[in-house]
Amino acid sequence: MGDGLRAAGHNELEEIGRLYHAVWQETQAPLQPPSVAAFRDETFFIERVRNFPVQPLAAYSEDRLLGFAAWAGNTLGQLYIAPAGRKLGLGRALLQASEHAIWASGFDRARLLCLVGNHDARAFYERCGWRHAADIVEAAETWSGPVSVACWEMVKELKV
Protein backbone atom coordinates (compact mmCIF):
# COMPACT_ATOMS: atom_id res chain seq x y z
CA MET A 1 0.00 0.00 0.00
CA GLY A 2 2.52 2.61 1.09
CA ASP A 3 2.12 6.00 2.67
CA GLY A 4 0.40 9.05 1.27
CA LEU A 5 -2.86 9.84 -0.48
CA ARG A 6 -4.47 7.78 -3.21
CA ALA A 7 -7.82 6.76 -4.59
CA ALA A 8 -9.16 3.90 -2.51
CA GLY A 9 -9.48 0.52 -4.11
CA HIS A 10 -12.77 -1.37 -4.01
CA ASN A 11 -11.30 -3.80 -1.46
CA GLU A 12 -10.63 -0.90 0.95
CA LEU A 13 -14.16 0.49 1.09
CA GLU A 14 -15.26 -1.59 4.08
CA GLU A 15 -12.25 -0.45 6.11
CA ILE A 16 -13.00 3.17 5.15
CA GLY A 17 -16.61 2.64 6.23
CA ARG A 18 -15.46 1.38 9.63
CA LEU A 19 -13.14 4.39 10.08
CA TYR A 20 -15.95 6.72 8.96
CA HIS A 21 -18.32 5.19 11.53
CA ALA A 22 -15.82 5.41 14.40
CA VAL A 23 -14.78 9.01 13.72
CA TRP A 24 -18.38 10.10 13.02
CA GLN A 25 -19.47 8.63 16.37
CA GLU A 26 -16.70 10.59 18.10
CA THR A 27 -17.01 13.93 16.32
CA GLN A 28 -20.49 14.21 14.80
CA ALA A 29 -22.91 12.11 16.85
CA PRO A 30 -22.65 14.32 19.98
CA LEU A 31 -23.80 17.33 17.90
CA GLN A 32 -26.94 15.65 16.52
CA PRO A 33 -30.15 14.20 17.93
CA PRO A 34 -29.50 10.74 19.46
CA SER A 35 -31.97 9.22 16.99
CA VAL A 36 -29.56 10.03 14.13
CA ALA A 37 -26.69 8.13 15.78
CA ALA A 38 -29.00 5.20 16.57
CA PHE A 39 -29.85 4.95 12.86
CA ARG A 40 -26.23 5.18 11.67
CA ASP A 41 -24.59 1.91 12.64
CA GLU A 42 -21.38 0.60 11.08
CA THR A 43 -23.28 -1.08 8.24
CA PHE A 44 -24.88 2.27 7.35
CA PHE A 45 -21.43 3.84 6.87
CA ILE A 46 -19.97 0.92 4.94
CA GLU A 47 -22.91 1.01 2.53
CA ARG A 48 -22.63 4.78 2.23
CA VAL A 49 -18.95 4.49 1.27
CA ARG A 50 -19.74 1.76 -1.27
CA ASN A 51 -22.27 4.11 -2.88
CA PHE A 52 -20.10 7.24 -3.14
CA PRO A 53 -20.27 8.66 -6.68
CA VAL A 54 -16.46 8.73 -6.87
CA GLN A 55 -13.87 6.57 -5.15
CA PRO A 56 -12.84 8.19 -1.88
CA LEU A 57 -9.35 9.54 -1.43
CA ALA A 58 -7.58 7.60 1.32
CA ALA A 59 -4.68 8.74 3.53
CA TYR A 60 -2.17 6.16 4.70
CA SER A 61 0.78 6.36 7.06
CA GLU A 62 2.95 3.35 7.86
CA ASP A 63 0.49 1.29 5.78
CA ARG A 64 -2.38 2.22 8.13
CA LEU A 65 -5.56 3.90 6.91
CA LEU A 66 -5.76 7.12 8.90
CA GLY A 67 -8.28 9.21 6.99
CA PHE A 68 -10.30 9.77 3.88
CA ALA A 69 -12.18 12.39 1.90
CA ALA A 70 -15.04 12.11 -0.58
CA TRP A 71 -17.02 14.56 -2.68
CA ALA A 72 -19.83 14.74 -5.21
CA GLY A 73 -19.83 17.51 -7.78
CA ASN A 74 -18.53 20.60 -6.00
CA THR A 75 -19.54 19.42 -2.51
CA LEU A 76 -17.00 17.94 -0.13
CA GLY A 77 -19.19 15.52 1.78
CA GLN A 78 -16.65 13.76 3.98
CA LEU A 79 -13.28 14.53 5.51
CA TYR A 80 -12.50 12.24 8.43
CA ILE A 81 -9.21 11.61 10.22
CA ALA A 82 -8.69 8.86 12.81
CA PRO A 83 -7.28 10.04 16.15
CA ALA A 84 -3.87 8.48 15.33
CA GLY A 85 -3.72 10.55 12.13
CA ARG A 86 -4.43 13.94 13.62
CA LYS A 87 -1.75 16.64 13.80
CA LEU A 88 0.16 14.96 10.96
CA GLY A 89 -1.09 17.26 8.19
CA LEU A 90 -3.32 14.56 6.71
CA GLY A 91 -6.48 16.63 7.03
CA ARG A 92 -4.94 19.56 5.17
CA ALA A 93 -3.46 17.23 2.52
CA LEU A 94 -6.82 15.51 1.96
CA LEU A 95 -8.61 18.87 1.85
CA GLN A 96 -6.19 20.32 -0.70
CA ALA A 97 -6.33 17.20 -2.87
CA SER A 98 -10.14 17.25 -2.73
CA GLU A 99 -10.24 20.94 -3.66
CA HIS A 100 -7.97 20.22 -6.62
CA ALA A 101 -10.14 17.30 -7.77
CA ILE A 102 -13.29 19.43 -7.51
CA TRP A 103 -11.59 22.23 -9.46
CA ALA A 104 -10.27 19.78 -12.07
CA SER A 105 -13.80 18.52 -12.67
CA GLY A 106 -14.89 22.02 -13.70
CA PHE A 107 -15.97 23.88 -10.57
CA ASP A 108 -14.72 27.31 -9.50
CA ARG A 109 -16.23 27.06 -6.03
CA ALA A 110 -16.33 24.21 -3.52
CA ARG A 111 -18.80 23.85 -0.69
CA LEU A 112 -19.24 21.70 2.39
CA LEU A 113 -21.55 21.44 5.35
CA CYS A 114 -20.18 21.57 8.88
CA LEU A 115 -22.43 20.77 11.83
CA VAL A 116 -23.29 23.80 13.93
CA GLY A 117 -21.29 23.42 17.13
CA ASN A 118 -18.32 21.69 15.49
CA HIS A 119 -16.07 24.68 16.18
CA ASP A 120 -12.79 22.78 15.70
CA ALA A 121 -13.78 21.68 12.19
CA ARG A 122 -15.03 25.15 11.26
CA ALA A 123 -11.80 26.73 12.51
CA PHE A 124 -9.77 24.19 10.49
CA TYR A 125 -11.67 25.00 7.30
CA GLU A 126 -11.35 28.73 7.91
CA ARG A 127 -7.56 28.36 8.39
CA CYS A 128 -7.55 26.61 5.00
CA GLY A 129 -9.26 29.53 3.25
CA TRP A 130 -12.91 28.50 3.51
CA ARG A 131 -15.56 30.96 4.68
CA HIS A 132 -18.97 30.67 6.27
CA ALA A 133 -21.64 31.39 3.64
CA ALA A 134 -24.93 30.52 5.34
CA ASP A 135 -26.68 28.71 8.16
CA ILE A 136 -28.87 25.96 6.74
CA VAL A 137 -30.93 23.04 7.98
CA GLU A 138 -30.49 19.56 6.53
CA ALA A 139 -32.64 16.50 7.04
CA ALA A 140 -30.99 13.49 8.71
CA GLU A 141 -32.67 10.11 8.52
CA THR A 142 -33.73 8.21 11.66
CA TRP A 143 -35.77 5.06 12.27
CA SER A 144 -38.84 7.26 12.79
CA GLY A 145 -38.28 9.59 9.84
CA PRO A 146 -36.10 12.63 9.11
CA VAL A 147 -35.05 15.16 11.75
CA SER A 148 -33.61 18.63 11.25
CA VAL A 149 -29.89 19.20 11.76
CA ALA A 150 -28.36 22.69 11.73
CA CYS A 151 -25.28 23.18 9.55
CA TRP A 152 -22.86 25.89 8.55
CA GLU A 153 -22.42 26.04 4.81
CA MET A 154 -18.77 26.74 4.07
CA VAL A 155 -17.46 27.75 0.64
CA LYS A 156 -14.12 28.33 -1.01
CA GLU A 157 -13.29 29.92 -4.33
CA LEU A 158 -10.97 27.56 -6.19
CA LYS A 159 -7.96 28.73 -8.17
CA VAL A 160 -5.40 26.98 -10.32
Image: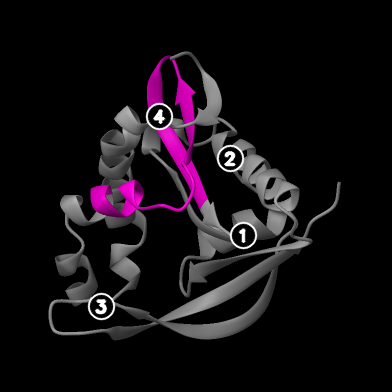
Q: In this figure, which residue is indicated by the disc labeled 1?
A: 123
Mark 2 vs mark 4: which is more N-terminal? 4
How far apart are the two marked residues, 2 and 1, measured between alpha carbons?
Answer: 16 Å
- Tell me what residue is drawn at x 33 percent, y 39 percent: 16
146, above or below 87, in the image: below
Earlier-in-chain disc, 1 versus 3: 3
Residue at far right of view: 160
Of label 2 and label 1, which has the lower sequence position?
2
Residue ID at (70%, 51%): 105
- The residue under label 4 is 9
Q: Amino acid at mark 3?
A: Pro
Type of amino acid under label 2:
Leu
Q: CA distance from mark 4 to mark 3?
A: 33 Å
| Residue 77 placement (x, y as % from top left) | 49, 59
Q: Which residues are magenta?
A: 46-70
Q: Which residue is mark 2?
A: 94
